Image: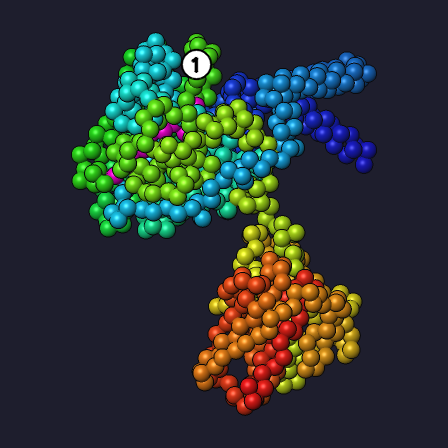
């Protein structure tokens, strides 16, 4: 055993050395690759799936972090072996020195990292809640967006890392030369929201929008990606499920949505976002590979396939989309201009001194050629084109020589819009504003000219940057937002406060007899309104000793009620039982959301031990009318209607004495207290023995609020 212990100790020591070295070199690698990014971006990608990451980044990490760590660990092992042969005591000293040296290296690297990326400030901001997003969010699900009679197509191109900075100073850029002359001309001839036709204007990037996924979400939802560790990208089954975004709106209006990217779509949660918001067809690297569209079965360059192929494929897709009756939205994301230094394809020329400048220039020409091709197609007349950089470049040295005071902005151009600007001056805007502006450019009328946190730039309404100032907006966006966490992200799969809130989930229990079998009928109401990511409900009856008497999965019926029939024959006579309801998540893990004990006795309801709260009883009475086939029941005068969970009516006759049917009443009015009403088909009942009871679920349980209808009624 001692030998085994010594071996394990040595293995753990070597592993500790390797991990300390790897952490230190990983920190240095991050600072080398991303010298100017924000910490929220680093947090986002740490919590995002690695799938789809560019091979160049992975190779660079292996060479600069993984390999040095392995070399240092191997050298330490060799040193230990050499010292052990000479002097056993020196081995222990060497171990201490090596651990301390690597620990100091890690502390130093972590301190530099924390200072550069303002880690302390990040967590300080996250510890403070801000209502800024909630107060300024124009919910697209509630704002009226009216489309023109003839709906326009949309081609939206996210230009990877493309800034107006790449233009020459005369055109509003920051360079002595123009890397993007074709794009510059497109912007000046169309809309870039500049007050001067000879000067470019573009979008600033706010907190939470400084990387590809942040930029794509911002421009299509009017929201930054905030929330920190645990963000929706790592959940893999949803991304901002509480938001209504461009894809959702277009799908609702009958559009065909498609996303094309030259990399695996999983990176950063793009696939989840675009499939769950607008049901986009995904044309990515894997789609092209499986479809035999790439030269070889193992073809892979840069992040997947290059932009030359992306635009060729896009032409094919546009021909197909335009041949159909439905309007379409084709969204593209380029990749050649990604840091570091870009991907020089076979068409790139050596016009400038750096590879990145040449790649950017090549991309400018390629985008212009693609736009020219679209203009030659029949569908162009009814198509709006949006070009915008997804974010500012992260290339670590390309813009080092520009004036430090230069205001960097993404490249922006809207081509063939269906509206005119109300004011011709230069706008101060960010990528969040592209969401409503895109719809306006498609000829849509937007109530209030606001969607999400974005403002329609064609209107005269001020953007948030114009109204509050860029620094203030970014400071507020950097803080924690309970509104985003609970209403937009919903990244906690099970919010127990919501799930167990008595007015959200309402449980009805009935008792019945079928021959010699005793059973309990359970109905669960309101589950469809719960924000948590449930994948079904399970009901169980347990005995006093905790043993399971019966269990089954609850079935959802047409009335949006989860039902279960549980047999309680094996429950000891006169003994109490416990009803439990569990919510199931996507991993089939069960979460207890309802538990109540009581006694089961023949021909009576399940007797609860808790008192019934009668404060919500309706005050104005109940009325009904019937024509022989349909009976209308109306209950009015409920106090504090927001505290009412559900109002149900039970209907039965002598034939269905042990199995009454129940119907939910709908709230129809708020005058003088809430009024509820329901129409019931009574043609199937024996009118001479027809009985009706009205129950209301308040905070304490079920309350009977109306006596039965008698035959004379």
Rendered position, 702 above or below 188: below
Task: Looking at the picture, tell me which residue is in the foreground, 162 or 128.
Answer: 128
Picture quadrant where residue 545 is located = bottom right
Residue of label 1? 406
Does residue 68 show up? no
Per the image, label 1 sits on a secondary structure element best described as: loop
Instruction: Kindly tell me whether residue 652 is visible in this rendering.
Output: yes
Report x, y in % for residue 180: 31, 19
Along the viewing direction, whichever of 185 and 705 lies nearer the viewer: 705
* Most distant residue in the front direction: 672
* Residue appearing at x 58%, y 83% in the figure: 709
Closer-to-camera residue (198/209): 198
Spot occupied by residue 665 in the image (x, y as percentages of width and height): 53, 69
Give the side of residue 159 with respect to residue 231, left or right: left
Q: Please name the residue shown 57% across and 55% down the image.
A: 530
Horizontal side of 414 relative to 580 (left or right) equals: left
- Residue 559 placement (x, y as % from top left): 50, 68
Q: Residues within 10 Å of mark 1 (few under 14, many from 20)?
A: few
Q: Main secondary structure of the magenta part?
A: strand
- Give the magenta range: 383-392
Q: Quadrant of the N terminus?
A: top right
**Residue drawn where x is 71% and y is 20% of the image:** 103
Magenta highlight on residue 120: no
Q: Nearer the viewer, residue 671 or 466?
A: 671
Q: Quadrant of residue 415?
A: top left
User: Residue 119, image x and y in percent?
Assistant: 62, 24
The answer to which image quadrant residue 569 occupies is bottom right
């Amino acid at each position: 055993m001692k030998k085994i212990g010594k071996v394990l100790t040595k293995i753990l020591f070597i592993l500790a050395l390797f991990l300390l070295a790897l952490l230190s070199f990983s920190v240095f690698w991050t600072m080398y690759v991303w010298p100017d990014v924000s910490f929220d971006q680093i947090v986002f990608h740490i919590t995002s799936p690695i799938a789809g990451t560019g091979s160049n980044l992975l190779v660079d990490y292996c060479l600069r972090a993984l390999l040095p760590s392995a070399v240092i660990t191997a050298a330490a092992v060799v040193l230990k072996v050499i010292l052990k042969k000479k002097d056993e005591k020196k081995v222990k000293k060497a171990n201490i020195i090596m651990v301390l040296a690597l620990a100091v290296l890690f502390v130093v690297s972590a301190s530099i990292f924390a200072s550069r990326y303002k880690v302390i400030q990040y967590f300080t901001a996250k510890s403070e809640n801000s209502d800024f997003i909630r107060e300024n969010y124009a919910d697209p699900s509630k704002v009226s967006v009216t489309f023109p009679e003839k709906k326009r197509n949309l081609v939206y191109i996210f230009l990877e890392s493309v800034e107006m900075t790449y233009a020459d100073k005369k055109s509003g850029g920051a360079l002595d030369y123009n890397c993007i002359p074709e794009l510059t001309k497109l912007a000046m001839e169309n809309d870039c929201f500049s007050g001067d036709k000879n000067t470019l204007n573009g979008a600033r990037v706010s907190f939470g929008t400084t990387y590809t996924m942040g930029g794509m979400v911002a421009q299509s939802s009017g929201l930054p990606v905030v929330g920190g560790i645990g963000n929706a990208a790592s959940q893999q089954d949803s991304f901002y499920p509480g938001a209504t975004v461009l894809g959702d709106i277009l799908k609702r209006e009958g559009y065909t949505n498609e996303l094309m990217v030259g990399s695996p779509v999983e990176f950063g949660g793009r696939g989840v976002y675009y499939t769950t918001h607008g049901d986009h067809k995904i044309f990515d690297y894997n789609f092209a590979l499986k479809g035999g569209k790439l030269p070889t079965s193992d073809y892979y360059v840069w992040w997947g396939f290059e932009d030359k192929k992306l635009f060729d494929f896009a032409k094919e897709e546009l021909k197909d989309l335009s041949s159909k009756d439905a309007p379409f939205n084709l969204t593209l994301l380029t990749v050649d201009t990604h840091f570091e230094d870009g991907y020089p394809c076979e068409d790139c020329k050596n016009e400038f001194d750096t590879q990145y400048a040449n790649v950017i220039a090549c991309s400018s020409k390629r985008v212009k050629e693609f736009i020219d091709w679209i203009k030659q197609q029949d569908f162009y007349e009814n198509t709006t084109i949006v070009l915008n950089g997804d974010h500012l470049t992260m290339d670590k040295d390309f813009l080092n020589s520009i004036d430090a005071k230069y205001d960097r902005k993404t490249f922006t151009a809207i081509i063939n819009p269906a509206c005119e600007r109300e004011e011709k001056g230069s706008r101060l805007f960010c990528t969040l504003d592209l969401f409503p502006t895109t719809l306006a450019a498609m000829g849509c009328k937007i109530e209030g000219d606001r969607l999400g946190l974005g403002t329609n730039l064609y209107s005269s309404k001020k953007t948030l940057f114009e109204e509050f100032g860029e620094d203030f907006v970014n400071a507020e966006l950097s803080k924690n937002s309970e509104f985003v966490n609970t209403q937009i992200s919903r990244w906690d799969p099970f919010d127990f406060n919501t799930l167990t809130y008595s007015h959200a989930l309402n449980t009805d229990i009935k008792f019945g007899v079928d021959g010699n079998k005793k059973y309990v009928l359970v109905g669960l109401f309101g589950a469809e309104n719960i924000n948590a990511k449930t994948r079904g409900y399970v009901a169980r009856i347990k005995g006093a000793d905790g043993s399971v008497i019966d269990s089954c999965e609850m079935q959802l019926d047409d009335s949006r009620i989860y039902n279960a029939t549980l047999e309680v024959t094996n429950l000891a006579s006169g003994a109490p039982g416990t009803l439990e309801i569990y919510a199931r998540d996507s991993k089939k893990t069960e979460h207890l959301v309802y538990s109540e004990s009581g006694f089961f006795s023949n021909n009576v309801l399940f007797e609860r031990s808790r008192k019934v709260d009668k404060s919500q009883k309706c005050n104005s009475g109940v009325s009904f009318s019937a024509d022989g086939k349909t009976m209308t029941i109306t209950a009015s005068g409920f106090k504090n209607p927001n505290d009412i969970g559900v109002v149900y009516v039970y209907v039965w006759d002598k034939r269905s004495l042990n199995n009454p049917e129940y119907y939910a009443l709908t709230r129809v009015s708020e005058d003088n207290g809430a009024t509820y009403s329901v129409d019931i088909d009574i043609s199937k009942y024996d009118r001479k023995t027809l009985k009706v009871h009205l129950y209301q679920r308040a905070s304490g349980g079920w309350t009977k609020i109306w006596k039965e209808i008698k035959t004379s009624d």
